[in-house]
Amino acid sequence: MTILYVGNSPETYGQCAKEKNLEIITASNSLEALKLLNKIKDISVIICNYNLPGNSGMFLYESIQEKPVFKNIPFILLSEEYNKNLFEESFKKGVSDYFVVKSTEVNHIIDKAQSLQNFKGNGNKVSKDLDQKVEYKIPISKRVFDIVFASLALIALSPLLLIIMLAIRLESKGKVYYIAKRVGRKTFDFYKLRSMRTGSDELIKKLAKEKNQYNSEKPEVTINLNKTCPKCEKLNEGQFCSPILHVDNNEICDYWYNYQKKEVEKNKSTFIKIVDDPRITKVGIIIRNTSIDELPQLINVLKGDMSIVGNRPLPVYEAELLTKDELSKRFLAPAGITGLWQVELRGKGGDMSEQERMQLDSKYADYFIGNNYSFWYDVQIILKTIPALLQKSSV
């Protein structure tokens, strides 16, 4: 990878590029830069200061865009101070990225240059992948087993289901079943026998804060809109390290807002599991401890929303938090009524950390997507589920 740096600090950028084993060539103005572009054909990324002798970095960018052979080279524009008009103009004209030198480390700029080069190299492949219609196909043996098992189970258990539904209705008013949106490989209507009192969804935020077994010991972190950005403090009055956001009648720079937002997300528990949930009815305790409340999911299996064995489908508010690759990988496996997490969690009486649950979800996804699917492995999980049905605690 070869970087062309245009500006007045070539030593700083040269040293940083050298540490990353990258080649960097420098030019002090637009004319020298254009000559180098014509001479050297394998320049990967251009990093350019806005203030150049005789003209500006935008002048160089516009000159490059006029030549088809150069116009696809990623272009990073640097300015000494944040300029709102320049910021908006640069992105409007197609500049790849914009950085304020005073508030950005050189190392970060070089890293961005590398990521732009990588994206450029994979651009055609990404476009082709997006254009193709990707279809998920469950193994035929797994699907046949799901249909046969679910059908026979529903027929055999129908008398029990009728008795339980009657008991639910007699104890508390409302529908005997519960429908919610869940996320597996897709979003679908998830069926369950109602084990809670009606209106329980309204209490979930309060209970999640007070009784969620996945809550960490860390103090709660929130975004402080009145706290001054440490980078902005180093600049002159009226200057900011990044664009200004207006949030709840407060002004806060983009960098400081997003930094605090990431800290908040780090302290959030991805999953919610209430220990000794007070919303559960007496009948609900019984059907939860015996997993009878899960039986309507056999209908989801027949519909193709779920499989007998897989990773548990998540509520939308939990799924939205799984944005990292190592976490979102769980969705590559089908949603299931039971799975590794179900077996391990119930066997330990509900005593399982959030990290352990994530690891088990990823483990099944690795096994399933690696063309290593085994019908007998699923059967083993089902057999392990049977003795784990009687839980040691209400979770």
Image (cartoon, rainbow, N blue to C red):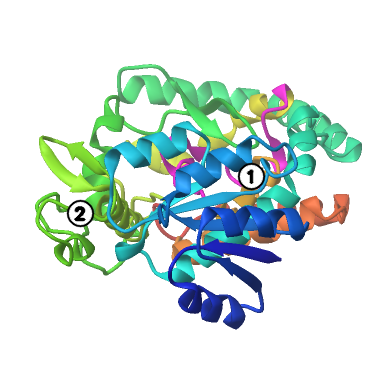
Q: Quadrant of residue 229?
A: bottom left
Circle 2 sits on which residue? 222
In the displayed structure, 54 sits above or below 392; it is: above
Estimate the x, y position of residue 133 in percent, counting from the top left: 79, 27
**At label 2, which amino acid type do we have?**
Thr
Task: Name the residue: 53% across, 66% down.
Answer: 110
In front here: 60 or 360? 60
**At label 1, which amino acid type do we have?**
Phe
Circle 2 sits in a helix, a strand or a loop, which is it?
Answer: loop
- Estimate the spatial distance between the alpha carbons at disc 2 and disc 1, rounded to whole Å: 29 Å
Is residue 317 inside the magenta stretch? yes
Estimate the x, y position of residue 83 in percent, counting from the top left: 28, 45
Task: Name the residue: 51% across, 49% down.
Answer: 323
Is residue 75 inside the magenta stretch? no
Estimate the x, y position of residue 216 in percent, counting from the top left: 31, 65
Task: Name the residue: 63% across, 64% down.
Answer: 3
Estimate the x, y position of residue 1 in percent, counting from the top left: 71, 66
| Residue 236 shows in this picture | yes
Circle 1 sits in a helix, a strand or a loop, which is it?
Answer: helix
In the displayed structure, 212 sits above or below 201; it is: below
Question: Which residue range is magenta in the image?
Answer: 303-323
In front here: 233 or 296? 233
Q: Farthest residue to the right: give it.
A: 141
